[in-house]
Amino acid sequence: MIQLKRVYDVPGPQDGHRFLVERLWPRGIKKTSLSMEAWLKDAAPSAELRQWFHHDPVRWEEFRARYFAELKERHDVLAPILNAACKGTVTLLYSSHDAEHNNAVALREYLERQLRAGRKG
């Protein structure tokens, strides 16, 4: 199972393996205080795509398409998340205020497709 959580929320035992999937470090969080397996900067959208999207819900569908195209080129970066998800719960950490239109939501969708395809193949 892949779940999502804001980086500012309190970690819990149900989180499983936690991965920060932001290109920029979240404001107000000390690097030493964030409980996580890894910070996977390259699993986040490119700076250009992130700036273009600017969390605009109108651009959501196009953002997802462009982001998925980027992820296809960086499949090796996703290996830690996919491997952990095969063994148990994974939590993707994000910093956006918008819980519906952010890169972690899109990344979860992409990863779940990869996991389903792996089970079929």
Image: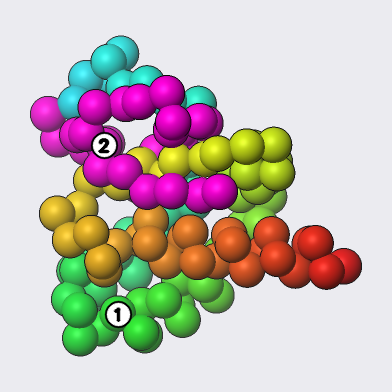
2 or 1: tag closer to the N-terminus: 2
Viewer-proximal residue among 18 and 41: 18
> In the rendered structure, which amino acid carries the disc numbered 1?
Trp
Tell me which corner region of the image, top left, top right, bottom left or bottom right, holds residue 67: bottom left
What label sits on residue 60 in the rendered view? 1
| CB atoms of marks 2 and 1 within 8 Å | no
Magenta-drawn stretch contains 7: yes
Residue stretch rendered in magenta on the structure: 1-28
Give x and y (percent) for residue 104: 38, 56
User: Image height check: is 59 above or below 16?
Assistant: below
Relative placement, left or right, of 34 versus 44 is: left
Relative placement, left or right, of 25 versus 114 is: left
Q: Is residue 89 visible?
A: yes
Tell me which corner region of the image, top left, top right, bottom left or bottom right, holds residue 86: top right
Give x and y (percent) for residue 112: 59, 62
Give x and y (percent) for residue 44: 42, 54
The residue at which mark 2 appears reads as 7
Q: CA distance from mark 2 to mark 1?
A: 21 Å
Viewer-proximal residue among 28 and 10: 10
